[in-house]
C-alpha cells in the first residue's frame, strides 16, 4: 500500500519532469515557429551591412532548439529570465509587478466562484421545490454558455466588479460536480440515519456530508486554479488589469516568444503545484 | 432520446438551415457595405440594423453561425479521431506507449486550455489572410483539443481489453486488428459520440474568446468572436449588438442539452 509520502514524491517527480518537458517543447515550438529566423531590426535602412551581419549572427546562435533550451536553462539557474523583446524590460521584473494583480483576482475568483456554486448546489440539493432546482440549473446553464471574454466586456462596460469576474466563470464549472457530489453524500445511509434521528441540518452538513465529500472537493479545488488562470487572460486583457494574463496576451499578440516561454513554465509550475497540494489534501482527508 | 435532447437538436437544425440559406434568401453578402446607412437602427430592410461600415448585421450573424456550425463540429471530429488514435493505441498496447501518451496528455492538461491555445496561436503567423487564419484557428483547436477525450478513450479501451468478451475473442484466435475493428470500436461508439458532442461547445466558446482578443479570423470575415468585438465600444452598444452573444448562448446550450449521455456498453 503506497503511503502519502510515496504518492507525493511521485507527484513532485512528475511535476519536475512535466516542467522540463514543457520547457523543451516550448523551446522547440519557438524555434520552428514561422518568422523565428527574421529580426525586424534588419529592416532598418540605416543599418550597415556589417550591423546586419552581426544581427544575423546573433540570431543564428539561437538557431538550434537544443542550444536555445540549454541557454535558457542556464540563465534560469542564474536567476536571469532574460529580457522581453517587445516590452524591452527584464522578464523577472515584469512578472514581479504583475503577479500580485493576478493572484488577487484569482483568489477572489476561486473563493467567490466556489461560494456561489456551493450556495446554488446546496439550494438545489436541499430544496424540494422544482422552481429552486430549475433556477439553479438555469443560472449554471446560462453562465456556462457565455464566452468568458464576452462576459468580461459586458461587466466592464456596465462598470461592474471586474476583479470578481472570475467567480462567474468558475461557478458554473464547479456547480454541476458539486451538486452531484452533495446529492450522493445526502443519500448515504449514515446521513439518512443522522437526519432521521433529528440532527440539525447544519450538524448533518458539517459532521457527515462534508467529511464524505471533502477528498473529492480538494481534488476539484486544484483544477479550479487552472480554470481561473485560463479565465484571467481575457478578463485582464479586456478589462485593462495589469496582470500575468494580460502579459500573456501582450506576448502572444507581439509574438514575444521568450516572454511566452517563461509564462508557460510559470503556469505549468503553479498549476502542477496546486494539483499536487490538492491531491495531498485529498489523500490526507481520505486516509483520516 | 429525451424530449429536451430532441428540442435542442431541432433548434440546432433550424439555426443551421437558416444560416445556410441566409445568403440565398436575401441575396445579401455579409461583406456588402451600404454606405448610405452606416450604424442604422433595426428596420424592415435590416432587422438587426447595420454596423459602423454599413454592413447588414443579420447577414453577418448568420454567416458567422454558418462558419461556426460547420467548422466547430469538423474540428471536434478531427480532435476526437486524434484522441481515439492516441488514446486507443495507448490503452490497447499499454507499456511504454501508454506511459508516453499519458505524459503528453498530462502535459497538455496541466496547462490552462485557453493559455495553451493563446500560446500556440501566437507561434503561428498572425497576419495571415482571413480564410487562412480561420483554418489555422480551428486546426489548432483540433490539434490541441484531443488530450481530454484521449484520457477517457484510453480508460475505456483499457477496461475493454481486459473484459470477458475481448478475452474470449482472443482465445478464439481473433487478431488485434480484427478485435479492434469488430469489437472495441463498435463498443466505443457511444463514448466517441459523447466526446464529439462535448467538444463542440468548448471549441465554439474558445473561438469566440480568441476572436474577441483579435486572434481569430480578421476582417472582413464574420465570426462570432469577431462580431462580439462591437461590444468593446461602450458608445456603440445597442440591444442589437448583443445578437451574436444570444446566438452563441443558444447554440452552446443546445449542444450541451443534445449531448448523448451514455456510458460504455460491453
Image: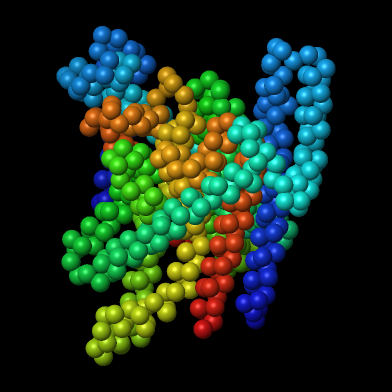
Q: Residue at x 33, y 12 (%)?
A: B33
Q: Is there any visible trace of residue A258 in the rendered image?
A: no
- Residue B42: image quadrant is top left
The residue sitting at the top extreme is B36
Q: Nearer the viewer, residue A176 or A169?
A: A169
Q: How many marks?
A: 0
Q: Nearer the viewer, residue A192 or B261?
A: A192
- Residue B47: image quadrant is top left
Q: Residue at x 38, y 30 (%)?
A: B229
For residue A148, side relative to residue A138 (left or right): right
Residue A274 higher or lower than A266, as above or below: below
Q: Nearer the viewer, residue B182 or B41?
A: B41
Residue A170 higher or lower than A32, as above or below: below
Task: State the image coordinates of residue A63 (x, y, percent, origin top left).
Answer: 78, 32
Q: Is there any visible trace of residue B115 in the rendered image?
A: yes
Q: Residue at x 48, y 50 (%)?
A: A101
The residue sitting at the bottom extreme is A197
Task: State the image coordinates of residue A135 (x, y, percent, origin top left).
Answer: 22, 57
Task: State the image coordinates of residue A146 (x, y, percent, origin top left).
Answer: 35, 44
Q: Nearer the viewer, residue A41 or A60?
A: A41
Residue B176 higher or lower than A66, as above or below: below
Q: Residue at x 53, y 20 (%)?
A: B129
Q: How is the image coloured?
A: rainbow
Amino acid at each position: 500500500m503506497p503511503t502519502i509520502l510515496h504518492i507525493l514524491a511521485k507527484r513532485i517527480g512528475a511535476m519536475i519532469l512535466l516542467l522540463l518537458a514543457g520547457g523543451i517543447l516550448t523551446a522547440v515550438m519557438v524555434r520552428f515557429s514561422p518568422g523565428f529566423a527574421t529580426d525586424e531590426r534588419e529592416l532598418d535602412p540605416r543599418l550597415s551591412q556589417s550591423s546586419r551581419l552581426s544581427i544575423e549572427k546573433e540570431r543564428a546562435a539561437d538557431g538550434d532548439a537544443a542550444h536555445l533550451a540549454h541557454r535558457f536553462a542556464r540563465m534560469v539557474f542564474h536567476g536571469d529570465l532574460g529580457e522581453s523583446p517587445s516590452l524591452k524590460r527584464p522578464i523577472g521584473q515584469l512578472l514581479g509587478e504583475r503577479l500580485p494583480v493576478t493572484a488577487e483576482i484569482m483568489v477572489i475568483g476561486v473563493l467567490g466562484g466556489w461560494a456561489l456554486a456551493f450556495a446554488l448546489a446546496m439550494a438545489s440539493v436541499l430544496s424540494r421545490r422544482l422552481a429552486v432546482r430549475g433556477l439553479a440549473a438555469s443560472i449554471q446553464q446560462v453562465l456556462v454558455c457565455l464566452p468568458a471574454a464576452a462576459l468580461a466586456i459586458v461587466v466592464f462596460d456596465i462598470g461592474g466588479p471586474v476583479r470578481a469576474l472570475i467567480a462567474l466563470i468558475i461557478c458554473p464549472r464547479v456547480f454541476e460536480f458539486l451538486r452531484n457530489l452533495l446529492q450522493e453524500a445526502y443519500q448515504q445511509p449514515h446521513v439518512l440515519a443522522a437526519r432521521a434521528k433529528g440532527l440539525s441540518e447544519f450538524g448533518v452538513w458539517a459532521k457527515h456530508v462534508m467529511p464524505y465529500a471533502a477528498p473529492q472537493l480538494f481534488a476539484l479545488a486544484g483544477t479550479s486554479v487552472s480554470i481561473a488562470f485560463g479565465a484571467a487572460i481575457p478578463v485582464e486583457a479586456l478589462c485593462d488589469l495589469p496582470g500575468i494574463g494580460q502579459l500573456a496576451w501582450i506576448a502572444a499578440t507581439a509574438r514575444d516568444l521568450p516572454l511566452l516561454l517563461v509564462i508557460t513554465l510559470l503556469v505549468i509550475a503553479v498549476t502542477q503545484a496546486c494539483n499536487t497540494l490538492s491531491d495531498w489534501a485529498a489523500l490526507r482527508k481520505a486516509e483520516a | 432520446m429525451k424530449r429536451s435532447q430532441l428540442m435542442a437538436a431541432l433548434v440546432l437544425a433550424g439555426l443551421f438551415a437558416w444560416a445556410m440559406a441566409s445568403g440565398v434568401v436575401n441575396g445579401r453578402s455579409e461583406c456588402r457595405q451600404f454606405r448610405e446607412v452606416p450604424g442604422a437602427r433595426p428596420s424592415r430592410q435590416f432587422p438587426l440594423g447595420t454596423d459602423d461600415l454599413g454592413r447588414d448585421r443579420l447577414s453577418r450573424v448568420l454567416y458567422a453561425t454558418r462558419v461556426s456550425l460547420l467548422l466547430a463540429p469538423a474540428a471536434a471530429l478531427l480532435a476526437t479521431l486524434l484522441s481515439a488514435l492516441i488514446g486507443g493505441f495507448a490503452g490497447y498496447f499499454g507499456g511504454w506507449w501508454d506511459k508516453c501518451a499519458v505524459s503528453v496528455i498530462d502535459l497538455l492538461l496541466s496547462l490552462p486550455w485557453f493559455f495553451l491555445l493563446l500560446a500556440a496561436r501566437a507561434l503561428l503567423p498572425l497576419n495571415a489572410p482571413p480564410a487562412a487564419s480561420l483554418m489555422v484557428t480551428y486546426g489548432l483547436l483540433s490539434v490541441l483539443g484531443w488530450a481530454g477525450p484521449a484520457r477517457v478513450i484510453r480508460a475505456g479501451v483499457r477496461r475493454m481489453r481486459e473484459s470477458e468478451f475481448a478475452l474470449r475473442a482472443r482465445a478464439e484466435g481473433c487478431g488485434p486488428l480484427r478485435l479492434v475493428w469488430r469489437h472495441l470500436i463498435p463498443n466505443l461508439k457511444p463514448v466517441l459520440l459523447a466526446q464529439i458532442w462535448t467538444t463542440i461547445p468548448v471549441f465554439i466558446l474558445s473561438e469566440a474568446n480568441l476572436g474577441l482578443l483579435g486572434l481569430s479570423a480578421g476582417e472582413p470575415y464574420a465570426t462570432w468572436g469577431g462580431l462580439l468585438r462591437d461590444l468593446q465600444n461602450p458608445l456603440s452598444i445597442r440591444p442589437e449588438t448583443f445578437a451574436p452573444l444570444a446566438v452563441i448562448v443558444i447554440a452552446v446550450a443546445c449542444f450541451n442539452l443534445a449531448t448523448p449521455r451514455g456510458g460504455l456498453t460491453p
